[in-house]
């Protein structure tokens, strides 16, 4: 029973359907209701790889990642007033600012979020510590 009239659940997408759908989105909401030390929702990596900026609804290290790498915006968990204000700002965003967010997402996905680069850095760390 949906109590919100203008929001509806559309069902589950397969990975291949998601690959086709995600790039069409302008923004994605990434909520993390409960703060978990250094827990990074995998959605962050996925969205960045598609160049989809995000509104991160959470705190901690992930909020810092979003800000430091210009992946979108952050607001406090459960702060729906700020979310409403943010959505009003995003709707009026100029194309250049939006494109910069997209470029930042793609840059992060091939840089700081690159699995290969993270593994290489981890191996280097291990080799230098042993």
Image: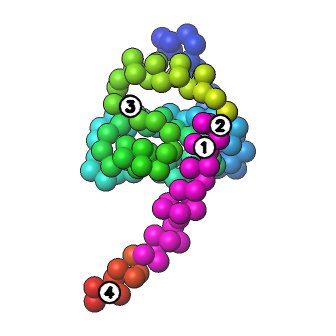
For mark 4, give the secondary structure: helix
Q: Residue at x 28, y 89 (%)?
A: 130
Instruction: Return the residue at label 1.
Output: 100
Q: Residue at x 56, y 50 (%)?
A: 104
Q: Position of residue 109 (x, y in %)?
A: 56, 57
Q: Mark 3 or mark 4, which is nearer the start of the sequence?
A: 3
Q: Decide whether residue 95 is among the magenta residues.
A: no
Instruction: Return the residue at label 4.
Output: 128
Residues at marks 4 and 3, CA–CA distance in whole angstroms: 39 Å
Circle nearer the viewer, 1 or 4: 1
Residue 122 appears in the picture as rendered:
yes
Q: Which mark is residue 75?
A: 3
Residue 17 appears in the picture as rendered:
no
Q: Check the image and tell me how it is coloured.
A: rainbow
Label 4: how many Cα within 10 Å (few below 14, some 14–19, many 20+): few
Residues at marks 2 and 3, CA–CA distance in whole angstroms: 22 Å
């Amino acid at each position: 029973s949906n109590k919100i009239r203008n929001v509806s659940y559309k069902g589950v997408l397969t990975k291949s359907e998601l690959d086709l759908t995600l790039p069409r989105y302008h923004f994605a909401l990434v909520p993390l209701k409960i703060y978990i030390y250094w827990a990074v929702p995998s959605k962050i990596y996925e969205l960045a790889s598609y160049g989809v900026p995000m509104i991160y609804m959470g705190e901690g290290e992930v909020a810092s990642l979003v800000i430091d790498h210009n992946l979108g915006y952050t607001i406090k968990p459960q702060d729906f007033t700020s979310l409403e204000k943010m959505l009003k700002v995003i709707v009026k965003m100029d194309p250049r600012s939006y494109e910069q967010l997209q470029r930042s997402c793609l840059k992060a996905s091939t840089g700081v979020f690159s699995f290969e680069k993270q593994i290489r850095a981890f191996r280097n760390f291990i080799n230098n510590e042993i």
